[in-house]
Amino acid sequence: MANIGFVGLGHMGLPMAINLLNAGHRVTGFDLSAQAMDAFALAGGMPASTLQSAALHQDVILTMLQTGQQVRQVCLGEEGLFARACPQALFIDCSSIDVARSRELHQHAIKRELRAVDAPVSGGVKGAANAALTFMVGGSQDAFLAAMPILSSMGKKIIHTGDAGSGQAAKICNNMILGISMIAVSEAFTLAEPLGLSAQKLFEVVSNASGQCWVMNQYVPVPGILENVPANHDYQPGFTAAMMLKDLGLSQQSADAVGVKTPMASHATALYQKLSDEGMSDLDFSAIIKVIASPHIMP
């Protein structure tokens, strides 16, 4: 079992850290939220008194933060995690950040004689709680193999996507598809009703026809069709619209960087920005149907 320093005990990070504890790992955790630290301690974790102490004497340092800037801030510099880490410790970044910053972190880790992987996740809070996440892992084969026992304690599917930053590239592309899919499904439900087709019958057809997708079959954005989806609970997240907007923003930043046009993702970004502008960024991303269905909100 490994000694793990875990930084970022939020909606995703806390259940991930708890699953590491349940697997028998020794986990020291740090978060700026006292409530998160209390919940972590209650689950059997060891709260770190400072960010730096979370890195001391650890085999693994794992970060699960919201932005690339946050990851860079906590890792780099003389007061950062890398400066306090043991040589040959393994750095696992599970945050969703831009590819360029991820590759920069890999290079800094190598200079500090650390191994590193970028390992963003798919599966949401439910997947984190059930240790059923999918990990997209970028880094050397050696670092990937070292990370496997740790990631296996938190997920069911671990895919080595290639070199440094490729895990982030995979996550960005996946969530670009997800955001567009949610809009397409929302448009279909919005169109069906005035055509005289019930939401239930549309679901029965599409979930068994060529239009089926994960959003339709597992995360439908209208209430009363599937159990345990945010639409049945006033769109409480889940995966927030703010996080989807962030990930779509990363897709546009990445597309601009390599000179690729992504018109559907560009329009999806604008629609999620509209949802945010309407004060609904804290709702689940499936609440985008509120924008699609409202003639007063649609841009």
Image (tube, rainbow, N blue to C red):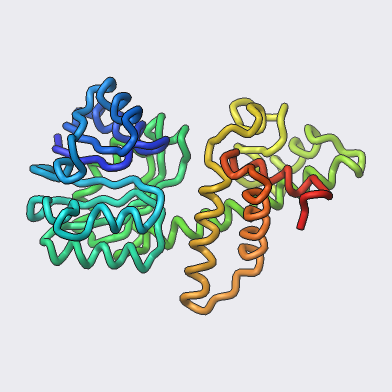
Which corner quadrant holds the C terminus?
A: bottom right
Residue 33 sits in quarter: top left
Residue 284 horizontal/vertical position (percent): 59, 39
Tell me residue 193's x, y (percent): 86, 40
Looking at the picture, how far across and down is residue 223, in whole percent? 71, 30
Say whether residue 1 is left or right of residue 18: left
- Residue 22, compared with residue 100, is above or below; it is above
How many marks overall?
A: 0
**Residue 59 visible in the shown view:** no
Q: Residue at x 75, y 35 (%)?
A: 204
Q: Which residue is more in the foreground, 217 or 11?
A: 11
**Can you say whether 117 is above or below 152 in the image?**
below
- Dividing the picture into quadrants, the one containing residue 13 is top left
Looking at the figure, which quarter contains the N terminus?
top left
256 lies above or below 248: below
Q: Does residue 103 appear to the left or right of 173 in the view shown?
A: left
Q: Nearer the viewer, residue 285 or 184?
A: 285
Q: Up-down: is 173 above or below 280?
A: below
Q: Is residue 160 left or right of residue 28?
A: right
Pick the residue in front: 282 or 139. 282
- Residue 283: % across, % down: 60, 38
